[in-house]
Image: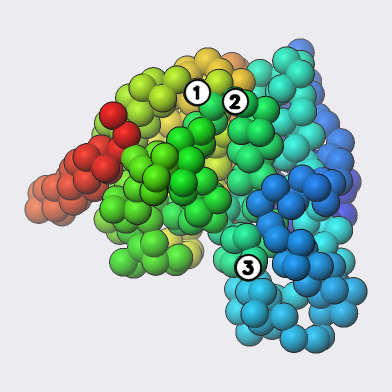
Amino acid sequence: MYSADHPLKPRRLIGVHDLLRRIGAFDRPNAVVLEPRDAAIAEIERIHSPEYIRAVQEASVDPDLEYARWGLSPYGDTPPFAGMHDASLLTTGATLRGMDEVLAGRLRVSFNGAGGLHHAMRDRASGFCIYNDPAIACGLLADRGLKVAYVDIDAHHGDGVQAAFYDTDQVLTISLHETGRSLFPGTGFADERGIGRGAGYSVNVALPPYTDDRAYTAAFDAVVPPLVARFRPDVLVTQQGIDSHYSDPLTHLQVSTHAREHAVRAFRGFDVPWVAMGGGGYDLDAVARGWSIEYLVMLGAAVPAELHDADPPAWTGDERDAIDVATDVAVRDALAAAFR
Ligand SMILES: [Zn+2]
């Protein structure tokens, strides 16, 4: 993960780092803070085309030229900016540095809060994402002959990772997200299930807006642990975007830190080498508390109650019924489309 004084670290991560330092998380004997490395071009090319990488390099030097065909537009979510190539190599490299340690057996789990840029496509930047570090990690792990379970709990569909492994059964992708009917990128429905050998290995749980902890946890438990157990991965890769939080300004899920802790405890319980990263998350207080809790869970440390949301949303009455029915449908469709 990034060191505290790194200039390229997004500002929202400083809050996570400060909170973890304040509660002594980095002083624990099993916590290690790693320096990131640059990703190699060959590693980026595992997922992205040489032409796209060249365009990002050019945009990095001369951001005022025209790059819209590569998803880089000053009027879009992902504008070109000076130095973007180098910054993205470092963001990706931080995930890979953690992966290196996990593969070597020196760490049980690594976490890169700056990573999880799951929307980037082979030839196109998208949704703030330039190089798709989770897909690159999954690809490099698969190239070693490992079976990879990728679980994405960002509020947005992990479309770029799904696309990268749509035709293979070596990487199982599971994404729980707010339905594409109400949220970017507009994909992630249960019938996107993979093709060829990959049929059934892309799993999508398209949750209704306003899904709360109770419904979210029920959906997670019905889909993620059983499918991961059935798949029997050699390695787990997780994208833990925390924009599913109820206070997030960009999304409509109503998930709290409690449901998130439950999910991350399940990840830990799979007991396989684990490469974790962040993702979205735009309410700074929720990002700081949420990822701090999740980091403590990764360490196997106790979670102080004051880090949690005091009063998470919980539907009652007709709204309860409506959310439960809609999440049940999402679960049923996801399981029906999954591999046997
Ligand atoms: Zn997101």
Q: What's under tag 2, amino acid-wise? A: Leu
State the image quarter where residue 291 is shown. top right
Q: Position of residue 184 (x, y in %)?
A: 44, 66
Between the C-alphas of marks 1 and 3, the distance is: 29 Å
Q: Earlier in the sequence, mark 3 or mark 2?
A: 3
Q: Nearer the viewer, residue 104 or 19?
A: 104
Between the C-alphas of marks 1 and 2, the distance is: 8 Å
SS label for mark 3: loop
Q: Earlier in the sequence, mark 1 or mark 2?
A: 2
Whether residue 100 is visible: yes
Does mark 2's beta carbon lie closer than 8 Å to ligand 1? no
Q: What's under tag 3, amino acid-wise? A: Arg
The nearer-to-camera label among 3 and 2 is: 2
State the image quarter where residue 138 is shown. top right
Name the mark on residue 124: 3
Tell me: residue 30, above or below residue 224.
above
Q: Position of residue 140 (x, y in %)?
A: 68, 37
Q: What's under tag 1, amino acid-wise? A: Pro
Q: Is residue 303 left or right of residue 59?
A: left
The nearer-to-camera label among 1 and 2 is: 2
Asked whether the residues under the numbered discs 1 and 2 touch, taking CB atoms below 8 Å apart as contact, a structural biologist would say yes
Q: Nearer the viewer, residue 251 or 288?
A: 251
Whether residue 173 is visible: no
Q: Residue at x 63, y 68 (%)?
A: 124
Name the mark on residue 306: none
Q: Residues within 10 Å of mark 1 (few under 14, many from 20)?
A: many
Name the mark on residue 233: 1
Tell me: residue 234, above or below residue 46.
above
Instruction: Kindly identify which residue carries mark 2.
Output: 146
Q: Position of residue 132 (x, y in %)?
A: 65, 53
Between the C-alphas of marks 3 and 2, the distance is: 27 Å
